Amino acid sequence: MKIHEYQAKELFKLYGVKVPSSVLCEKREDIEPILREISFPCVIKAQVHSGARGKAGGVKLAKDYNSAVEIANNILGMELKSTQAGTKKVRKILIEQGIDIDKEIYLSLTFDRANECIALIVSTEGGMDIEAVAKEAPEKIHTELIKEIFHPLETVSKLGFNAEITNKIVDIVNSLYKLAIEKDASLVEINPLVITKQQDVIALDAKINFDDNAIFRHEDILALKDEAEENPFELEAQKSGLNYIKLDGTIGCMVNGAGLAMATMDVIRLAGKDAANFLDVGGGASSEKIEKAFKLLISDENLEAVFINIFGGILRCDFLAEGVKNAIKTLNVQCPVIVRMEGTNKELGSEILNNSGLKFTVVNDLNEAIEVIKKI
């Protein structure tokens, strides 16, 4: 789960990390009253769940009141180009005190799945895309895998700052590590963490992602979720108990099991197409859940066909076939539907589909599925 920058900064403050003073604004009529109460320069930031806001025009410096009014009105309500497909409407802006910056640092704590631990990452190249730094100047990135013993002082010292600044950064690392552990965060990132000309260390930006599988333990964090920032299909899927992720392709996937979903997307790619989604109905899907899954699939305006790839274990193939047949009748599905089933009651499931009077293409294996998808 993602939260906004302004929400992340409130958490930072709770854990003793300094952030600039700021005011959140959600209405145009509040812009001028807010700006009359602050000092300049200020920075106006779009609050959306998207990276590269600055490149897309969502973060701008205002030197005086008049320019701030113009910038704030332009950003609030704009359609901001997202790092994902499409755009996102800016519903909130953060009006933030300008900071006298001397140096910028990158700092993050993220979960390293390969090593099964949290990794501390720091770099003197703050403000840049860390991926670009890793490619162009990897020697400027310093990483510590946090296992039994944590040595933030040793890692931060590699940045080359004096003892006072180094110790301030270490204090921030320790605070953020505590936040990550206590709140089950999968990512805590500051880019940039700035050193001011007054030798203070301040988090100019803030990004926190939380582990969805642990969110049930944190009602306070769940309350921060902004449903307006969620993909409406994914939000509806969550409410229906489905695992759904919107993708950019044209072939809808219905599977049971995350591993099978990944393999199915590979099969679609081998057929020269791309998956429209990742949709896992789970092991014990009911007819109602299957119908809801189909409703999600056919709501995608880019959809060319649906590929159902099911391994019948807990979810028997005949039960799936009945659910799919009923869903297609109820929803009047017009696009081609390709079905591949293996496992319990496969023959019975195929018989139900073939005798349904509906336009199914039942295939026996993945190679046959590839040939069918190629022709769509």
Image (cartoon, rainbow, N blue to C red):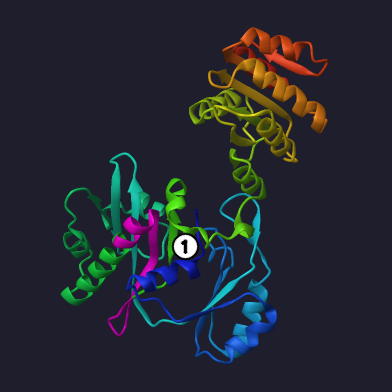
Question: x%, y% of residue 338?
Answer: 70, 20
Please state which of residues 189 and 66 is positioned toward the viewer in this rendering: 189
In what quadrant of the picture does the C terminus appear? top right
Is residue 196 inside the magenta stretch?
yes
User: Toward the viewer: 267 or 221?
Assistant: 221
Left/right placement of residue 295 relative to residue 213 reads: right
> Relative to residue 206, is residue 210 depicted above or below?
above
Question: For the point 68% across and 79% down, which residue is it?
Answer: 28
Residue 29, percent across and down? 69, 83
Quarter of the image holding residue 244?
top right
Magenta segment includes 120: no
Residue name at image x 41 percent, y 68 percent:
11
Number of numbered labels in the structure image: 1
Q: Which residues are magenta?
A: 178-201
For residue 225, say whether it is visible: yes
Looking at the rendered structure, the kind of residue marked 1 is Asp
Which residue is disc 1 drawn over? 220
**Is residue 155 positioned above or below 286 on the image?**
below
Determine the residue positioned at 29% across, 61% down.
Answer: 178
Q: Is residue 71 above or below residue 226?
A: below
Residue 215 location, x and y as percent? Answer: 45, 52
